Image: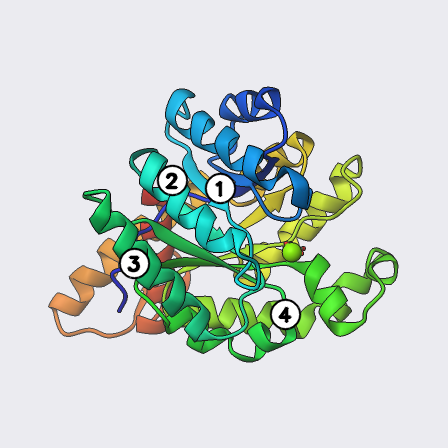
Amino acid sequence: MSSRTKRARRAQLAVPATTDKLLAKAAQNPADHVFLDLEDAVAPTAKKQAREQVIRALNELEWDNKVRCVRINDLSNPNCYQDIVEIVSRAGANLDTIMVPKVKVAADIHFVVTLLEQVEKQSQLNRKIGIEVIIEDVDAVHNAFEIARSSERVEALIFGAGDFAASMGIDMRAAERPGQADELWYFARYQMVMAARSVGIDAIDSPILDVRDVDAYTADARRGLAMGFTGKWAIHPLQVAPAMEVFTPAREKVEFARRVVSAYAEAEAKGIGSILFEGQMLDAAVVRNHRLLVEHAQRMGL
Ligand code: GLV
Ligand code: MG
């Protein structure tokens, strides 16, 4: 299957690149992924200054083992190429991925890849910057499989409910009513998770806007986990702990999965394809799921 780079992204913390103080606070946050936002959290007149702040923050702050990501401006905006050129050439050594918003088609990713290749070469950067794609446009949902396959650099698809609502003409207030998000986002979320899973990359879910309602966030995260998502956006530090908790596989589940994988390998070596193990019937399909869990847990250092 895929040789895509795997990283931990249970909680992706959104950090508006507006003040140095916010950026410094984010570096201390326990989320395993942070994205410094140059797009929708930054006013058009502040884009240039925000870019400079991001470059400083990447180069000067200590981010521990976090995935360091920058959300660049979208492709319809000249800030997009400037973000890529400036950030990768001046802070590429301290950057893991870029997040590309409002993608519509696979060719959008081809453009980003070409630019990355040139900037990395010109800057003699000996690492490849990964790409995370926000699926938040009706066209993107339609083209999700092609977008996922567009480049080996694509490591994650992220569902962007806010822009998706706008793209569909859906009132976000309706979606925030209890139970409504499940129905309104069901198709888009499911299609996106399938596209991500088809190439073995991460599927990251949207947050909820009411940041004080941690119970609602946690319930939404659990539904996402059940659907195959591997992480969730946190738009406030209050949302980080529940995302980290929900998307960390339980120790007993991981241990059981490890036992299953080794018992099944032994059975297979003897030419047996299905076994009764600790009360459960296991065949190759069931074991495949356990194997994925073992790999996933390894990535989180469990
Ligand atoms: C995220 O970018 C969203 O639009 O929800
Ligand atoms: Mg958006």
Residue 248: numbered disc:
1
Residue 268, percent across and down?
17, 68
Indicate which disc, 1 or 3, sits on the residue closer to the N terminus: 3
> Distance from label 2 to label 1 (Cα)?
8 Å
Which amino acid is tagged 4?
Asp
Please name the residue shown 46% across and 26% down the image.
57
Residue 42, percent across and down?
65, 41
Figure quadrant, ligand 2: bottom right
- Say if mark 2 contacts mark 1, CB within 8 Å: yes
> Distance from label 1 to label 3 (Cα)?
21 Å
> How many residues crowd around disc 2 within 10 Å: few (fewer than 14), some, or many (20 or more)?
some
Residue 300: numbered disc:
2
> How many residues crowd around disc 3 within 10 Å: few (fewer than 14), some, or many (20 or more)?
some
Which amino acid is tagged 3?
Arg
Label 2 C-beta lies within 8 Å of the nearest ligand 1 atom: no
Which residue does the numbered mark 4 point to in the structure image?
Answer: 137
> Which of 181 and 82 lies nearest the eye of the viewer?
82
- Say if mark 4 contacts mark 1, CB within 8 Å: no
> Distance from label 4 to label 2 (Cα)?
31 Å
> Which of 280 and 162 lies nearest the eye of the viewer?
162
Determine the image quadrant of residue 218. top right
Please name the residue shown 80% across and 42% down the image.
210
Regarding mark 2 in the picture, which secondary structure is present there?
loop
Question: Is residue 225 depicted above or below 20 in this figure?
Answer: below
Indicate which disc, 2 or 1, sits on the residue closer to the N terminus: 1
